[in-house]
Amino acid sequence: MDDMYNNSENQEQGSYGGSQYQQPQTSSIQSQLQYQYQPAQDNLEEPMSMGEWMISMLVMLIPCVNIVMMFVWAFSSTEKKSKSNFFKAYLIFFAIMMVFSIVLVIVMSAAAVGVMESLESNYYYY
């Protein structure tokens, strides 16, 4: 009985601790992962300079021109990707604020009409 226990123990040691299973080489896996996840250097573009951002912000101060230029910069294929993405986000934010402003004007107008009607009805009682 002891021999059976010792034999099965030796077999288990041989199958797990022996040379049947090889440890993966960490250096080759690391090099594969580094190669796989390195960003492509060809797709990078030059970032916008401080002067380009200053000119963009100055143009945004001009009424009516700013709205037109937001669309031009957001959807132009010749603009830098960072500038295009910024103005796309700016347009989304602008649209949300316009909807919010319109709803606020409607609510305030309704409140003003209600106040005027209540003052008008109280005026007739005097």
Image (tube, rainbow, N blue to C red):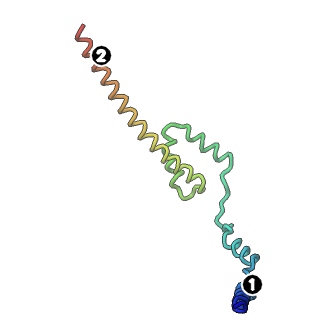
- Mark 2 neighbour density, 10 Å: few (under 14) some (14–19) many (20 or more): few
Return the residue nearer the eye: 97 or 126: 126
Residue 15, image x, y percentages: 70, 88
Observer-side mark, 2 or 1, equals 1
Residue 21, image x, y percentages: 71, 85
Pointer 1: what residue? 17
Q: Is residue 58 left or right of residue 23?
A: left
Label 1: which secondary element: helix
Residue pictured at 31% horizontal, 24% vertical: 113
Label placed on residue 119: 2
Mark 2 vs mark 1, CA separation in Å? 94 Å
The outermost residue toward the top is 126
Residue 25, image x, y percentages: 75, 79
Q: Is residue 96 left or right of residue 117?
A: right
The outermost residue toward the front is 1
- Which quarter shows the C terminus? top left
Q: Is residue 121 left or right of residue 35?
A: left
As drawn, 68 above or below 17? above
Q: Which quadrant of the structure image shows residue 110? A: top left
Label 2: which secondary element: helix
Dots 2 and 1: beta carbons under 8 Å? no
Residue type at mark 1? Gly
Residue type at mark 2? Leu
- Mark 1 neighbour density, 10 Å: few (under 14) some (14–19) many (20 or more): few
Mark 2 or mark 1: name the one nearer the start of the chain. 1
Residue 64, image x, y percentages: 48, 39
Q: Which quadrant of the structure image shows residue 106? A: top left
- Which quarter shows the N terminus? bottom right
Residue pictured at 39% horizontal, 36% vertical: 102
